[in-house]
Amino acid sequence: MNFKNILLMKKNLWLSTYLLFISLLGYSQILDEFRGIGRTGIYVNETGLLKEWPENGPEMIWSIEDIPIGHSALSAAYDMLYLTGIRDSLEYIFALNMDGEIKWETNYGRAWNGPFPNSRCTPTIENERLYVSSGLGDLACLNAMNGEIIWQFRATDKFEGTYGKWGIAESLIVLDNKLFYTPGGNKTTMVALDKNTGETIWMTESLNDNPSYTSPLLIQKNGLNIIANVTENYIIGVNADNGEMYWKFKYGEYAGKRGTNININTPVYADGKLFVTDGYDHKNVMLELSDDLKKVSLLWSNDVLDVHHGGTVKLGNYIYGSNWEHNGMGNWVCLEWESGKTMYETEWINKGSIIAADGLLYCYEEKFGNMAIVDPNPNEFKVISSFQIPLGSRGPYWTHPVIKDGILYVRHGDALMAYDIRK
């Protein structure tokens, strides 16, 4: 065993002991989740990154192909990378080391069996545990170190949940001793489970509505905790302690001609305001939350930024993303956060996903797999550098990129690539 591996073992042993200690005290420590800690898409701890790339892009330090196929992004902890993917009709979670070698993989549920079956759930890492959902609504908790299943069950069956035409695409959220899931249907809308056992703690009222494909958001203000999510027809805010549904905004009334149940993007919260956007000409909405988080009111709505499924980021007083013109095209948009004023709408190859780090936007267009760094100037969409992703199976480039310790991770279907973007 080399010196590097010995140091890594000591580091993980220390971290495991620390996390076990805080877990015994009842504390919850989220180590990573969909679109980074807080689900903002902004990787605030990533600094010292390249402000311009070489002509052919940054250095690819490793790649791996033939992994279980999926659209899910990755999460990272313990010097491991965690992703989900499918083989045949089963969904897997697998772990790679920081050199791109698979260390273990575990089947945890049934894959979606309809259109676009590739996995979507990004693992949530809390202490030493991983939490995942499958395309048919199977939930599981696994040991992050070795992939052993701690508990699992068919949650959509248990709670009589329903599906949209593309199954389930929820990346789970954890707070204190609870794990939250949104099955929809006639029995309930959202449930809280004991994260250690999977047993039910509470169920909300039913809105008799289908779930969407949205991953929820935790809103914390004045000592209160709200889980916000989007169903087919509503934006909801649920008290995390007892499951009381504080508000249910009729988001379906803002849908375009294509109708509802195309809701995918995690809402964005800042300064007492909640922004929700989805594609297919669905108008976005900006909601203002009361100080006690029990009420919402509409501040403004805009029909320019209807994000298909690439997410948005808020930098300063502006929000950035790409809109839906049709399934094969979309433009890049900047709105003023306070007013909804359109600052620009610019064509660049195609719509796609967006994240931010170290003062730059990272845009990954979905048609040809071009990755770009963009100046977050609210007056123009200015590409600083770009390159094309070379690997992966056929199909759209839908996975949200991730930055961890100066490495840009880009997935396309059955391939994962790691690029060194440090100065």
Image (cartoon, rainbow, N blue to C red):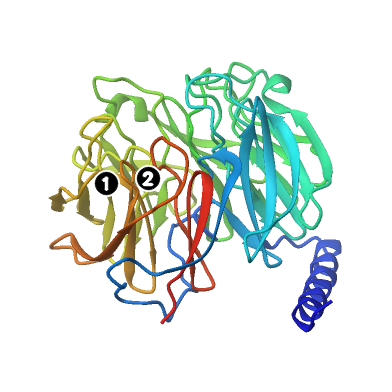
Instruction: Name the element at disc 1.
Output: strand
**Residue 63 percent location from the top left of the image:** 54, 58
Vertical order, 183 against 360 (above or below):
above
Crowding at dot 2, Cα within 10 Å, few <14 / some 14-19 / many 20+, comes out as many
**Residue 403 percent location from the top left of the image:** 48, 64
Q: Which residue is drawn at 52% across and 59% down?
A: 36
Mark 2 or mark 1, earlier in chain: 2
Q: Relative to the observer, which residue lies in front, 173 or 321?
A: 321
Rendering quarter of residue 205: top right
Q: Which residue is drawn at 67% across and 57% down?
A: 96
Instruction: Name the element at disc 2.
Output: loop
Q: Mark 1 = which residue?
A: 322
Viewport quadrant of the N terminus? bottom right
Q: Which amino acid does label 1 sit on?
A: Ser
**Residue 264 percent location from the top left of the image:** 43, 36
Cα distance between the residues tagged 2 and 1:
7 Å
Is residue 197 among what the camera can see? no
Q: Mark 2 = which residue?
A: 310
Viewport quadrant of the C terminus? bottom left
**Residue 123 percent location from the top left of the image:** 63, 48
Q: Relative to the observer, which residue lies in front, 59 or 298?
A: 59
Crowding at dot 1, Cα within 10 Å, few <14 / some 14-19 / many 20+, comes out as many
Q: Relative to the observer, which residue lies in front, 99 or 277?
A: 99
Are the residues tagged 2 and 1 within 8 Å (C-beta)? yes
Q: Which mark is residue 174?
A: none
Is residue 295 among what the camera can see? yes
Q: What residue type is labelled 2?
A: Gly
Q: Residue at x 48, y 27 (%)?
A: 116
